[in-house]
Image: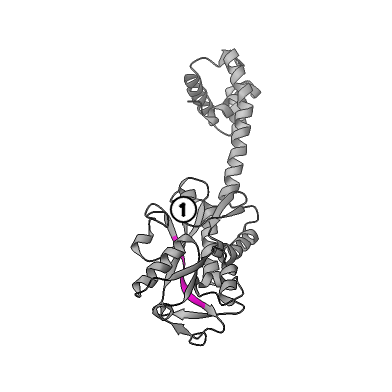
Amino acid sequence: MIEARHLRVLRAVAATGSFSAAARELGCTQPAVSQQMKALEGAAGTPLLIRTGREMRLTEAGEALVRHAAGILAGLTAAEEEVAAIAGLRAGRVRLVSFPSGSSTLVPTALAGMRAAHPGTRVSLVEAEPPRSVEMLRAGDCEIAVAFRYPQADDAAEAGGGWEDLVARPLLSDRLVVVVPREHRLAGAGTVGMAELAEEPWIAGCPRCRRHLVEVCESEGFTPRIDFATDDYPAVIGLVAAGLGVAVLPELALESVRAKGAVTLEVKPAVRREVVALTLPDLARVPAVAATLDRLESAARR
Protein backbone atom coordinates (compact mmCIF):
# COMPACT_ATOMS: atom_id res chain seq x y z
CA MET A 1 0.00 0.00 0.00
CA ILE A 2 1.33 3.41 -0.98
CA GLU A 3 1.34 5.78 1.99
CA ALA A 4 1.20 9.56 1.95
CA ARG A 5 4.43 9.90 3.95
CA HIS A 6 6.26 7.84 1.32
CA LEU A 7 4.94 10.12 -1.44
CA ARG A 8 6.21 13.18 0.42
CA VAL A 9 9.67 11.60 0.63
CA LEU A 10 9.61 10.71 -3.07
CA ARG A 11 8.73 14.29 -4.02
CA ALA A 12 11.55 15.61 -1.84
CA VAL A 13 14.08 13.20 -3.40
CA ALA A 14 12.88 14.09 -6.91
CA ALA A 15 13.14 17.81 -6.15
CA THR A 16 16.55 17.73 -4.44
CA GLY A 17 18.24 14.90 -6.35
CA SER A 18 19.61 13.01 -3.34
CA PHE A 19 18.67 11.25 -0.13
CA SER A 20 20.83 13.54 2.00
CA ALA A 21 19.33 16.73 0.56
CA ALA A 22 15.82 15.29 0.89
CA ALA A 23 16.56 14.40 4.53
CA ARG A 24 17.64 17.99 5.25
CA GLU A 25 14.46 19.34 3.62
CA LEU A 26 12.21 16.94 5.53
CA GLY A 27 14.05 17.31 8.84
CA CYS A 28 14.92 13.63 9.21
CA THR A 29 17.96 11.35 8.74
CA GLN A 30 19.31 9.98 5.46
CA PRO A 31 18.77 6.34 6.55
CA ALA A 32 15.10 7.18 7.28
CA VAL A 33 14.71 8.55 3.74
CA SER A 34 16.40 5.46 2.31
CA GLN A 35 14.14 3.11 4.30
CA GLN A 36 10.97 4.91 3.22
CA MET A 37 12.01 4.89 -0.42
CA LYS A 38 12.72 1.16 -0.17
CA ALA A 39 9.25 0.64 1.34
CA LEU A 40 7.65 2.72 -1.42
CA GLU A 41 9.39 0.75 -4.18
CA GLY A 42 8.25 -2.45 -2.47
CA ALA A 43 4.65 -1.22 -2.42
CA ALA A 44 4.86 -0.07 -6.05
CA GLY A 45 6.41 -3.34 -7.17
CA THR A 46 8.93 -1.63 -9.44
CA PRO A 47 12.04 0.60 -9.12
CA LEU A 48 11.27 4.31 -8.86
CA LEU A 49 14.80 5.72 -8.78
CA ILE A 50 17.97 5.12 -10.77
CA ARG A 51 21.09 5.68 -8.65
CA THR A 52 24.16 6.78 -10.63
CA GLY A 53 26.96 7.75 -8.27
CA ARG A 54 25.80 10.66 -6.17
CA GLU A 55 22.95 11.54 -8.51
CA MET A 56 19.52 10.05 -8.67
CA ARG A 57 16.92 10.27 -11.34
CA LEU A 58 13.40 8.95 -11.63
CA THR A 59 12.37 5.91 -13.61
CA GLU A 60 9.30 6.14 -15.80
CA ALA A 61 7.24 4.71 -12.94
CA GLY A 62 8.82 7.20 -10.53
CA GLU A 63 7.94 10.11 -12.84
CA ALA A 64 4.33 8.91 -13.04
CA LEU A 65 4.08 8.59 -9.26
CA VAL A 66 5.56 12.04 -8.66
CA ARG A 67 3.12 13.49 -11.19
CA HIS A 68 0.16 11.98 -9.30
CA ALA A 69 1.64 12.66 -5.87
CA ALA A 70 1.06 16.41 -6.17
CA GLY A 71 -2.68 15.98 -6.61
CA ILE A 72 -2.91 13.21 -4.01
CA LEU A 73 -1.07 15.18 -1.32
CA ALA A 74 -2.97 18.38 -2.12
CA GLY A 75 -6.27 16.50 -1.82
CA LEU A 76 -5.16 14.88 1.42
CA THR A 77 -4.14 18.24 2.87
CA ALA A 78 -7.49 19.72 1.91
CA ALA A 79 -9.27 16.75 3.48
CA GLU A 80 -7.24 17.08 6.68
CA GLU A 81 -8.06 20.78 6.90
CA GLU A 82 -11.79 20.15 6.31
CA VAL A 83 -11.93 17.38 8.91
CA ALA A 84 -10.07 19.60 11.39
CA ALA A 85 -12.59 22.39 10.74
CA ILE A 86 -15.52 20.02 11.34
CA ALA A 87 -13.91 18.59 14.47
CA GLY A 88 -13.32 22.12 15.73
CA LEU A 89 -16.91 23.21 14.95
CA ARG A 90 -15.65 25.72 12.38
CA ALA A 91 -17.57 23.86 9.68
CA GLY A 92 -19.99 20.97 9.21
CA ARG A 93 -23.73 20.42 9.18
CA VAL A 94 -26.43 18.87 11.32
CA ARG A 95 -29.78 17.81 9.85
CA LEU A 96 -32.49 18.07 12.48
CA VAL A 97 -36.02 16.63 12.34
CA SER A 98 -38.64 17.69 14.89
CA PHE A 99 -42.38 17.45 15.49
CA PRO A 100 -44.24 20.79 15.05
CA SER A 101 -44.63 21.90 18.68
CA GLY A 102 -40.95 21.13 19.27
CA SER A 103 -40.03 23.08 16.14
CA SER A 104 -41.81 26.18 17.43
CA THR A 105 -40.51 26.07 21.01
CA LEU A 106 -37.32 24.10 21.71
CA VAL A 107 -35.65 24.22 18.31
CA PRO A 108 -35.47 28.02 17.70
CA THR A 109 -33.65 28.66 21.00
CA ALA A 110 -31.27 25.74 20.36
CA LEU A 111 -30.45 26.85 16.82
CA ALA A 112 -29.92 30.46 17.86
CA GLY A 113 -27.44 29.24 20.47
CA MET A 114 -25.63 27.08 17.91
CA ARG A 115 -25.36 29.95 15.43
CA ALA A 116 -23.98 32.31 18.06
CA ALA A 117 -21.42 29.81 19.41
CA HIS A 118 -20.51 28.00 16.18
CA PRO A 119 -21.41 30.16 13.14
CA GLY A 120 -19.57 27.82 10.77
CA THR A 121 -21.84 24.87 11.59
CA ARG A 122 -25.03 24.73 9.53
CA VAL A 123 -28.14 23.20 11.11
CA SER A 124 -31.15 22.50 8.89
CA LEU A 125 -34.68 21.66 10.05
CA VAL A 126 -37.42 19.45 8.63
CA GLU A 127 -40.69 18.69 10.42
CA ALA A 128 -41.93 15.14 10.93
CA GLU A 129 -43.88 13.36 13.65
CA PRO A 130 -42.62 10.10 15.14
CA PRO A 131 -42.41 7.37 13.98
CA ARG A 132 -41.48 8.99 10.66
CA SER A 133 -38.75 11.11 12.27
CA VAL A 134 -37.20 8.05 13.92
CA GLU A 135 -37.30 6.19 10.60
CA MET A 136 -35.48 9.12 8.95
CA LEU A 137 -32.76 8.96 11.62
CA ARG A 138 -32.18 5.24 11.13
CA ALA A 139 -32.20 5.68 7.32
CA GLY A 140 -29.45 8.30 7.48
CA ASP A 141 -31.69 11.20 6.41
CA CYS A 142 -30.91 13.23 9.53
CA GLU A 143 -28.47 13.33 12.44
CA ILE A 144 -30.93 14.23 15.23
CA ALA A 145 -34.63 13.51 15.66
CA VAL A 146 -36.61 15.38 18.32
CA ALA A 147 -39.42 12.95 19.15
CA PHE A 148 -41.92 12.06 21.83
CA ARG A 149 -43.73 9.05 23.17
CA TYR A 150 -46.37 8.39 25.78
CA PRO A 151 -45.54 6.26 28.83
CA GLN A 152 -47.79 3.37 27.79
CA ALA A 153 -45.75 0.31 26.79
CA ASP A 154 -47.73 -0.24 23.59
CA ASP A 155 -46.82 3.25 22.37
CA ALA A 156 -43.23 2.17 21.63
CA ALA A 157 -44.09 0.68 18.23
CA GLU A 158 -45.96 3.78 17.10
CA ALA A 159 -43.14 6.03 18.33
CA GLY A 160 -40.68 4.31 15.96
CA GLY A 161 -40.04 1.01 17.66
CA GLY A 162 -37.78 0.53 20.66
CA TRP A 163 -35.09 3.16 21.11
CA GLU A 164 -32.53 0.77 22.61
CA ASP A 165 -30.24 1.11 19.57
CA LEU A 166 -30.30 4.92 19.77
CA VAL A 167 -28.83 7.54 22.06
CA ALA A 168 -31.81 9.22 23.73
CA ARG A 169 -31.13 12.59 25.37
CA PRO A 170 -34.11 13.38 27.66
CA LEU A 171 -35.37 16.92 27.14
CA LEU A 172 -38.54 17.29 29.18
CA SER A 173 -41.66 15.64 30.53
CA ASP A 174 -44.48 17.43 28.70
CA ARG A 175 -47.71 17.60 30.70
CA LEU A 176 -51.04 17.35 28.86
CA VAL A 177 -53.78 19.81 29.74
CA VAL A 178 -57.49 20.01 28.93
CA VAL A 179 -58.64 23.00 26.88
CA VAL A 180 -62.28 24.13 27.27
CA PRO A 181 -64.26 27.16 26.04
CA ARG A 182 -64.10 30.19 28.32
CA GLU A 183 -67.83 29.85 29.03
CA HIS A 184 -67.60 26.15 29.86
CA ARG A 185 -69.13 24.95 33.13
CA LEU A 186 -65.69 23.79 34.35
CA ALA A 187 -63.70 26.79 33.08
CA GLY A 188 -63.01 28.06 36.59
CA ALA A 189 -62.24 24.68 38.13
CA GLY A 190 -58.45 24.80 37.71
CA THR A 191 -58.23 21.00 37.62
CA VAL A 192 -60.44 18.37 36.05
CA GLY A 193 -60.71 14.60 35.90
CA MET A 194 -61.16 13.08 32.46
CA ALA A 195 -64.33 11.31 33.59
CA GLU A 196 -65.96 14.71 34.18
CA LEU A 197 -65.78 15.29 30.43
CA ALA A 198 -67.32 11.98 29.38
CA GLU A 199 -70.34 13.61 27.72
CA GLU A 200 -68.39 16.33 25.90
CA PRO A 201 -67.68 16.44 22.16
CA TRP A 202 -63.91 16.17 21.57
CA ILE A 203 -61.43 17.75 19.17
CA ALA A 204 -58.46 15.44 18.61
CA GLY A 205 -55.00 15.94 17.16
CA CYS A 206 -52.57 13.76 15.20
CA PRO A 207 -53.32 10.00 14.80
CA ARG A 208 -51.05 9.01 17.70
CA CYS A 209 -52.51 11.75 19.88
CA ARG A 210 -56.05 10.60 19.01
CA ARG A 211 -55.13 7.04 19.92
CA HIS A 212 -53.66 8.17 23.20
CA LEU A 213 -56.75 10.28 23.95
CA VAL A 214 -58.99 7.26 23.44
CA GLU A 215 -56.77 5.11 25.68
CA VAL A 216 -56.78 7.67 28.50
CA CYS A 217 -60.54 8.15 28.29
CA GLU A 218 -61.23 4.41 28.19
CA SER A 219 -59.07 3.97 31.27
CA GLU A 220 -61.50 6.41 32.95
CA GLY A 221 -64.51 4.39 31.85
CA PHE A 222 -65.75 6.10 28.69
CA THR A 223 -65.05 6.39 24.97
CA PRO A 224 -64.71 9.99 23.75
CA ARG A 225 -67.00 11.25 21.00
CA ILE A 226 -64.52 12.82 18.56
CA ASP A 227 -66.31 15.36 16.36
CA PHE A 228 -63.25 17.02 14.84
CA ALA A 229 -59.62 16.04 14.22
CA THR A 230 -56.79 18.29 13.11
CA ASP A 231 -52.98 18.36 13.43
CA ASP A 232 -53.07 22.19 13.54
CA TYR A 233 -52.89 23.38 17.17
CA PRO A 234 -54.25 26.89 16.43
CA ALA A 235 -57.19 25.22 14.70
CA VAL A 236 -57.80 23.09 17.80
CA ILE A 237 -57.85 26.22 19.97
CA GLY A 238 -60.14 27.96 17.50
CA LEU A 239 -62.62 25.09 17.53
CA VAL A 240 -62.59 24.95 21.32
CA ALA A 241 -63.00 28.73 21.64
CA ALA A 242 -66.00 28.54 19.31
CA GLY A 243 -67.67 26.13 21.73
CA LEU A 244 -67.47 23.12 19.42
CA GLY A 245 -65.82 20.80 21.91
CA VAL A 246 -62.99 20.24 24.38
CA ALA A 247 -59.46 19.00 23.71
CA VAL A 248 -56.31 17.69 25.33
CA LEU A 249 -53.08 19.37 24.26
CA PRO A 250 -49.46 19.17 25.44
CA GLU A 251 -48.27 22.26 27.29
CA LEU A 252 -45.40 22.56 24.81
CA ALA A 253 -47.90 23.19 22.02
CA LEU A 254 -49.63 25.94 23.98
CA GLU A 255 -46.37 27.90 24.37
CA SER A 256 -46.60 29.04 20.76
CA VAL A 257 -50.40 29.32 20.47
CA ARG A 258 -52.51 32.12 21.92
CA ALA A 259 -55.41 30.44 23.70
CA LYS A 260 -57.87 33.27 23.01
CA GLY A 261 -61.41 32.34 24.04
CA ALA A 262 -60.26 29.11 25.70
CA VAL A 263 -59.14 28.06 29.20
CA THR A 264 -56.63 25.37 30.15
CA LEU A 265 -57.25 22.99 33.06
CA GLU A 266 -54.80 20.70 34.80
CA VAL A 267 -55.63 17.00 34.35
CA LYS A 268 -55.91 14.84 37.46
CA PRO A 269 -54.26 12.37 37.55
CA ALA A 270 -51.47 13.93 35.48
CA VAL A 271 -50.89 12.69 31.93
CA ARG A 272 -47.49 13.33 30.37
CA ARG A 273 -45.42 12.54 27.30
CA GLU A 274 -41.65 12.08 27.15
CA VAL A 275 -39.80 14.44 24.78
CA VAL A 276 -36.29 13.40 23.76
CA ALA A 277 -33.58 14.12 21.21
CA LEU A 278 -32.49 10.94 19.44
CA THR A 279 -29.33 10.16 17.50
CA LEU A 280 -27.20 7.16 16.55
CA PRO A 281 -24.33 6.12 18.87
CA ASP A 282 -21.62 6.93 16.32
CA LEU A 283 -23.19 10.30 15.52
CA ALA A 284 -23.32 11.22 19.20
CA ARG A 285 -19.50 11.49 19.12
CA VAL A 286 -19.51 13.98 16.23
CA PRO A 287 -18.75 17.41 17.75
CA ALA A 288 -21.48 19.32 15.87
CA VAL A 289 -24.12 16.73 16.78
CA ALA A 290 -23.04 16.68 20.43
CA ALA A 291 -23.13 20.48 20.56
CA THR A 292 -26.64 20.57 19.06
CA LEU A 293 -27.85 18.00 21.59
CA ASP A 294 -26.44 20.17 24.38
CA ARG A 295 -28.24 23.22 22.99
CA LEU A 296 -31.55 21.35 22.78
CA GLU A 297 -31.15 20.22 26.38
CA SER A 298 -30.41 23.79 27.48
CA ALA A 299 -33.44 25.10 25.58
CA ALA A 300 -35.67 22.54 27.32
CA ARG A 301 -34.54 23.74 30.75
CA ARG A 302 -35.65 27.32 30.14
**Residue 277 in magenta?**
no
Q: Seen in the image, is 236 located left or right of residue 216?
A: right
Q: Nearer the viewer, residue 94 or 13?
A: 94
User: In this rendering, is residue 158 above or below 205?
Assistant: above
**Residue 172 in magenta?**
yes
Measured as percent of width and height from the top left, residue 50 is found at 57, 13
Residue position marked by numbered label 1 in the rendering: 134
User: In this rendering, is residue 213 above or below 200?
Assistant: above
Q: Nearer the viewer, residue 100 or 181?
A: 181
Q: Seen in the image, is 245 located left or right of residue 164?
A: right
Measured as percent of width and height from the top left, residue 270 is found at 41, 76
Q: Quadrant of residue 29?
A: top right
Task: Sort mark 1 into few (<14), some (14-19) or many (20+) by Cα contacts within 10 Å.
Answer: many
Secondary structure found at label 1: helix
Q: Seen in the image, is 125 located left or right of residue 209?
A: right
* Residue 15 visible to the viewer: yes
Seen from this angle, which residue lies furthest bottom? Answer: 188
Q: How are the colours assigned in the image?
A: one colour
* Residue 59 visible to the viewer: no
Query: Which portion, as a residue range, is magenta?
Result: 169-179
